[in-house]
Amino acid sequence: ETGVTQTPRHLVMGMTNKKSLKCEQHLGHNAMYWYKQSAKKPLELMFVYSLEERVENNSVPSRFSPECPNSSHLFLHLHTLQPEDSALYLCASSQEPGSYTPQHFGDGTRLSIL
Amino acid sequence: EDQVTQSPEALRLQEGESSSLNCSYTVSGLRGLFWYRQDPGKGPEFLFTLYSAGEEKEKERLKATLTKKESFLHITAPKPEDSATYLCAVYNTDKLIFGTGTRLQVFP
């Protein structure tokens, strides 16, 4: 596999469920990102990891919990979500944060909260 | 405040009808401007990087240009397969800031 892959592609969950989103990059990059994309709004940066260390947390509610076990894998653990959390969640990777090189995106997980 | 504004919000073109998309930006220190294409149900696909005013990049029917305040994505003789949302993003000192995109539809 090449590029950035995300699973699952679609997820429907209730407000009391716990689920996880997974991202894997095959580009040899050192930085990984989580973004939220809602209709009519710009992509919102949620978290940034560099070499498995979190370097950015953009005032994201604690019901979103990221995990980066190594430089190729990134998870987003979800619990007690709200209806306004329904969105497309995108993972991206780049060479280094702050290297001003392109970020490469996966195809996202479409999340629906009932 | 660092900001990226794209216009128009939506654009409908006849096949072969050339046009341009605009991305204007205000950032404290531009470190690069990026164009992405996003198809429905997919993630953004990287197209171009521009780093300095006057720079131009081309790929098939697309040409991106950069000034000190804005970037244009010129589409020459578009085809229906060029239909997508085109996103512009700029790096300020440490973050990639996105616009809301231009949704392009090209009709045969």
Image (cartoon, coloured by chain):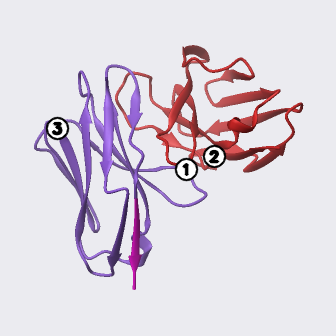
Chain colours: A red, B purple
Asked whether the viewer can see residue B75, the reply is no
Amino acid type for the residue under numbered disc 2: Gly
Q: Which residues are magenta?
A: B103-108
Q: Confirm whether circles 3 and 1 share one chain.
A: yes
Q: Quadrant of residue B30?
A: top left
Badge 1 element: loop
Is residue B75 placed above or below A88 in the rendered structure? below
- Determine crowd level at label 2: few under 14, some 14-19, many 20+ residues with C-alpha closer than 10 A: many
Badge 3 element: loop
Is residue B7 placed above or below B31 in the rendered structure? below
Quick one: label 3 or label 1, which is nearer the N terminus?
1
Say which residue label 1 marks.
B43
Q: Which residue occupies the extreme front position in the image?
A: A83
Say which residue label 3 marks.
B69
Closer to viewer: mark 3 or mark 1: 3
Badge 2 element: loop
- Determine crowd level at label 1: few under 14, some 14-19, many 20+ residues with C-alpha closer than 10 A: many
- The chain holding disc 1 is B
Q: Position of residue B38 (x, y in %)?
A: 48, 55
Q: Quadrant of the C terminus of chain B?
A: bottom left
Q: Which mark is residue A104?
A: none
In percent of the image, x 89 and y 30: which residue is there? A16
Do residues under tags 3 and 1 come within 8 Å of each other at their CB atoms? no
Q: Position of residue A81 (x, y in %)?
A: 78, 30
In percent of the image, x 53 and y 39: which residue is there? A27
Question: Magenta residues: mostly which secondary structure?
Answer: strand
Q: Position of residue A48 (x, y in %)?
A: 54, 22
Amino acid type for the residue under numbered disc 3: Lys
Do residues under tags 2 and 1 come within 8 Å of each other at their CB atoms? yes
- Residue B105 shown in magenta: yes
Q: Which mark is residue A108?
A: 2
